[in-house]
Image (tube, rainbow, N blue to C red):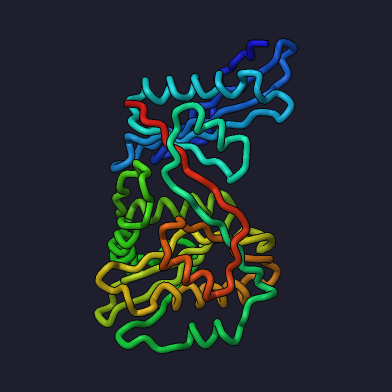
C-alpha cells in the first residue's frame, strides 16, 4: 500500500516560527501517520527546521514514515534550511528509523523528575537561605517587570554556551521584546510562568531559572531554562536559584505533583545540581540531525 499524503493548514504559527503538516492515509482514507515541520524564523536560527513524525504502530514498516519524512525533508530543503533535527526516545522505533535514514545522533538528554511530596524541604530551605556575598534573589510571575526587562534580556546570554554537543542549533538573540513575547506565549497557552533570578550588587541580573506550571496548578511543572553569566559562575548560584524555585512552587501550587527537567548528558554541572536537589532520572532521549546541504 502506498499511503496518500495530504498537506494540512496548521494555524500554529507566530513571529518566531511557522509549521507545515502532512497527514498520511490508507486506501480507505483512514489516518495512519502525520508529520509536522517547524520552520524557525528568528535571527540566528533561520537555517534550522524541527521535525515531529508519528506513525500508527500497526502501520509501521510499510513505508508510511519514509513517505512523510521525504515530504518534510523536501519542504525543509526548498525553504533553504541547512539542518533538520528530530527527537527520539531511547529504545523507541524512532531511534533506529532516523539512524537508518541518514540522521546523525548529535545530542543525548536525560530527563529527571522531582516529586514535590518527597522533596527534602529542610535541605531546600537551608540551600535557599544560604547567603551568597554580593548577590540576592528576586522573583516574579509572568512577564518580567519593566524595571528589570533590560537587564533580564541581557542575562539571557548565559544560555549561549549551553552544551548542545554537535547540534547545529545556532544562537538566539534575546531582546526585551523577545523576552516579553516568550512570556506572552506561555500565558496564551493558559500556563503560569515563574522566574527566580540572582541579582548582583550593582542591581543587574546575572542568573535566572524559569518554571512553567499548568494553569490549574496540577500535574507537573517544567523547568524551561537555568543559566548563570560566565563571569558569575562558581558561586553556587544555579543551585541557590533552583532551590528557591522549588520552594516557591510548593507554596504557590500545593496541588502540583512534581517538577520536570531535561539536561544534556554533557552538562555535568547542571546534572549534579539536579541530583543534589533530589531530581531522579526518568528516561533519556536523543536529538538527531540531518544535514540538508
| The quarter of the displayed image where residue 258 is located | bottom right
**Residue at the location (52% across, 73% down)?**
245
Residue 279 in picture, x, y percent from top left: 58, 68
| The quarter of the displayed image where residue 63 is located | top right
Residue 242 in picture, x, y percent from top left: 48, 72
The relative height of residue 73 versus residue 14 in the rendered view (above or below) is above
**Residue at the location (66% across, 69% down)?**
115
Residue 89 in picture, x, y percent from top left: 58, 44
| The quarter of the displayed image where residue 125 is located | bottom right
**Residue at the location (53% across, 71% down)?**
275
The relative height of residue 22 versus residue 266 in the rendered view (above or below) is above
Residue 285 in picture, x, y percent from top left: 54, 48
State which quarter of the image contains the C terminus.
top left
Q: Nearer the viewer, residue 249 or 89?
A: 89
- In the rendered view, does 146 fall on the left or right side of 5? left
State which quarter of the image contains the N terminus.
top right
Total numbered badges shown on the rendered structure? 0
Q: Nearer the viewer, residue 224 or 105?
A: 105
- In the rendered view, does 227 fall on the left or right side of 258? left
The relative height of residue 171 versus residue 79 in the rendered view (above or below) is below
**Residue at the location (57% across, 77% down)?**
247
Amino acid at each position: 500500500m502506498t499511503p496518500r499524503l495530504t498537506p494540512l493548514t496548521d494555524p500554529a504559527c507566530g513571529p518566531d516560527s511557522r509549521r507545515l503538516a502532512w497527514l498520511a492515509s490508507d486506501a480507505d482514507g483512514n489516518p495512519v501517520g502525520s508529520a509536522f515541520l517547524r520552520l524557525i524564523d528568528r535571527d540566528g536560527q533561520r537555517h534550522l527546521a524541527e521535525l515531529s513524525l508519528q506513525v500508527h504502530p500497526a502501520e509501521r514498516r510499510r513505508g508510511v514514515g519514509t513517505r512523510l519524512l521525504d515530504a518534510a525533508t523536501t519542504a525543509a530543503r526548498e525553504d533553504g534550511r541547512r539542518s533538520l533535527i528530530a527527537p527520539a526516545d531511547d529504545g523507541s522505533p524512532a531511534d533506529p528509523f532516523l539512524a537508518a535514514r541518514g540522521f546523525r545522533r548529535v545530542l543525548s538528554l536525560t530527563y529527571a523528575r522531582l516529586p514535590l511530596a518527597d522533596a527534602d524541604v529542610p535541605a531546600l530551605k537551608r540551600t535557599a537561605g544560604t547567603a551568597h556575598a554580593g548577590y540576592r534573589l528576586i522573583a516574579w510571575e509572568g512577564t518580567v517587570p519593566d524595571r528589570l526587562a533590560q537587564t533580564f534580556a541581557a542575562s539571557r546570554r548565559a544560555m549561549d554556551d549551553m552544551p548542545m554537543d554537535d547540534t547545529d542549533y545556532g544562537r538566539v538573540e534575546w531582546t526585551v521584546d523577545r523576552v516579553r513575547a516568550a512570556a506572552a506565549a506561555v500565558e496564551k497557552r493558559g500556563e503560569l510562568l515563574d522566574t527566580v533570578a540572582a541579582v548582583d550588587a550593582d542591581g543587574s541580573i546575572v542568573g535566572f531559572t524559569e518554571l512553567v506550571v499548568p494553569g490549574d496548578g496540577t500535574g507537573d511543572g517544567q523547568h524551561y531554562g537555568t543559566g548563570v553569566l560566565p563571569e558569575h559562575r562558581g558561586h553556587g548560584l544555579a543551585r541557590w536559584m533552583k532551590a528557591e524555585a522549588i520552594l516557591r512552587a510548593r507554596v504557590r501550587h500545593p496541588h502540583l505533583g512534581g517538577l520536570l527537567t531535561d539536561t544534556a548528558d554533557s552538562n555535568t554541572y547542571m546534572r549534579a545540581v539536579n541530583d543534589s536537589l533530589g531530581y531522579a532520572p526518568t528516561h533519556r532521549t536523543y536529538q538527531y540531525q540531518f544535514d540538508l546541504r
